[in-house]
Amino acid sequence: MSAEISIGVLFVVMGLVFVLIPLEHLKKAFPRMRSSYTTKLGGAALLIAGLGLIISRLTALYG
């Protein structure tokens, strides 16, 4: 597995954590987190970035 795919998987997992876990539980681990809107938006950005990395690498390998 290439490094780009590994980083993509890491981004996807982190994005899913920030999107799926409620803000109250995240505030226990990250006490300075304020807005649920920006937290969910950042999680979605990580998710999209991770999927983009995975797809771009797979198309480069097999395309």
Image (cartoon, rainbow, N blue to C red):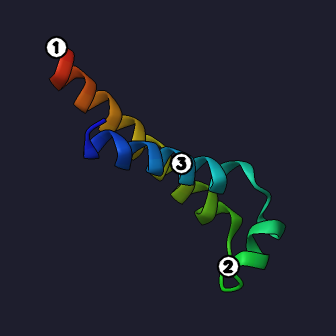
Image quarter in which the C terminus is found: top left
The numbered dot on residue 18 is: none
Q: Nearer the viewer, residue 1 or 51?
A: 1
Q: Nearer the viewer, mark 1 or mark 3?
A: 1
Of label 3 and label 2, which has the lower sequence position? Answer: 2
Disc nearer the start of the sequence (1/2)? 2
**Amino acid at the residue labelled 2:** Phe
Name the spot of residue 31 as percent of width and height, x first.
71, 84
Residue at left 22%, top 21%? 59
Give the residue type at disc 3.
Ala
Say whether disc 1 or disc 3 marks the residue closer to the N-terminus.
Answer: 3
Residue drawn at (32%, 28%), measured in percent from left and top?
55
Residue at the outermost front position: 1
Whole-number angstrom distance, CA of label 1 to CA of label 3: 27 Å
- Alpha-carbon span between mark 3 and mark 2: 18 Å
* Image side of residue 49 versus residue 45, left or right: left
Residue visible at 65% across and 61% down in the picture: 37
- Per the image, label 1 sits on a secondary structure element best described as loop
Which residue was labeled with disc 3? Answer: 44
Q: Is residue 36 left or right of residue 49?
A: right
Q: Residue furthest bottom?
A: 32
Q: Is residue 1 above or below residue 18?
A: above
Graded by Cα atoms within 10 Å as few (under 14), some (14 to 19) or many (20 or more), the crowding at tag 2 reads few
Sort mark 3 into few (<14), some (14-19) or many (20+) by Cα contacts within 10 Å: many
The front one of 46 and 11 is 11
Label 1, residues with CA under 10 Å away: few <14, some 14-19, many ≥20? few
**Residue placed at 53% from the left, 48% from the top?**
44
Name the residue tied to disc 2: 30
Q: What separation in Å lies between label 1 and label 2 (alpha carbons)?
A: 41 Å
The residue carrying mark 1 is 63
Image position, residue 8 (x, y; %): 38, 44
